[in-house]
Amino acid sequence: MAKRKSAEEPQRAIAWRPLAWLLGAVVLAGAILITALRVDFAVRGVDKPAIVQVAASRVEGCSLARDKQRFPEMMRVEAGEYLLPTDENGRELMLHLKPLGMTRVTQEQPFLLQRSEVTIEQFGWFVKAINDMSDGPRKEQLLAIIGLHWDKTDPKNLSKEGYYGGSASPAARAISREGARAFIDWLNERTGCRYHLPTRNQWAAAVISQHLASGQPASAAEANDGGVLGGLLRGVREWSDTGCANGFFLLGHDQWTTEPNVGVSACMPGMLSVAGFRLARELDDGS
């Protein structure tokens, strides 16, 4: 015998309908909110909020950089027009810059430049990071880029300490441009900064700025003895971010460059040549 439905059951069903509608509205509102957030992140080029947090911490890390082992020591070069000194005090600068047509240099924006070249020790941190990678095509590619002579210094020391012995300068000087770029990419990923190679214009502005700040004659002897200006002029030939017909311009000259070769423009292919390098970055990069 079929059970008769209670007269109260339809009333219970009717009573539950507002609650069901309310739950449905909450679910719909949540779906709309999630969709809106996804659209917002997509517009900003971000996949998920975690990436935004990582990016923010990286910028803060760059602005709070104080660890000299992790962050290169930088100096500020102001914007402005830099004129090559024409008196006797500027003779050394004249030898370097006049043949390059850089007697007047206009720097539109202030920037930060590393006070010295990247050292063998600093580049060695990058090499260690590569060696610690799991074996694979990327590791092999990076090892090929850095080459076998990244930790070699001055070949003139053959008679004293053997081939590629020690040097007065700890700067890495046997780095291809691709090796320099790989180091910079690694450092940027590690620090959150946006380092890059300096342009030839930035280098010239830094040279003249350092000379004017010192108020002292820039002699060849002083350029060879070291210091910031000496490193810029005759420490190690350095890679620039300024392109030329065959590749990229080199900056400055090596410590053993003879005077007839000073000021001669050097345009070299990035992978087939080696040099030293230093870092630059803009002031709006967390500064």
Image (cartoon, helix red, strand yellow):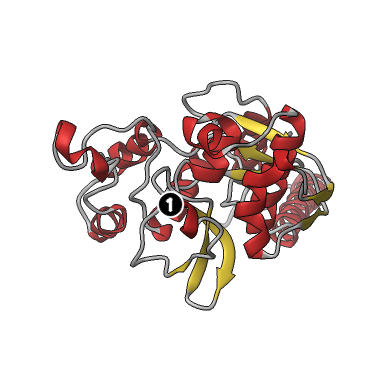
Residue 24, percent from left and from top: 76, 52
The quadrant of the rendering that contains the C terminus is: top right
**Label 1 SS:** loop
Q: Position of residue 135 (x, y in %)?
A: 20, 51
Query: For the point 46% across and 38% down, which residue is it?
Result: 118
Q: Decide if residue 199 is in sight here.
A: no
Residue 16 place in picture, x, y as percent: 78, 46
Residue at 54% x, 37% y: name it.
Answer: 223
Seen at 17% across and 32% down, the residue is: 160
Q: Is residue 3 visible?
A: yes
**Which residue is the site of mark 1?**
258
Q: Residue at x 63, y 63 (%)?
A: 99
Please state the horizontal and vertical placement of residue 46, each as a whole percent of the image: 65, 54
Few, some or many C-alpha atoms within 10 Å of disc 1 (few <14, some 14-19, many ≥20)? few
Q: Give amino acid for label 1.
A: Thr
Would residue 244 appear left or right of 203 to someone viewing this image? left
> In screen coordinates, is 213 left or right of 235?
right
Q: Quadrant of the N terminus?
A: bottom right
Depth order, front residue of 163/282: 163
Q: In the visual, does 87 lie left or right of 96?
A: right
Q: Of residues 203 and 134, which is closer to you in this image? A: 203
Quarter where residue 222 is shown: top right
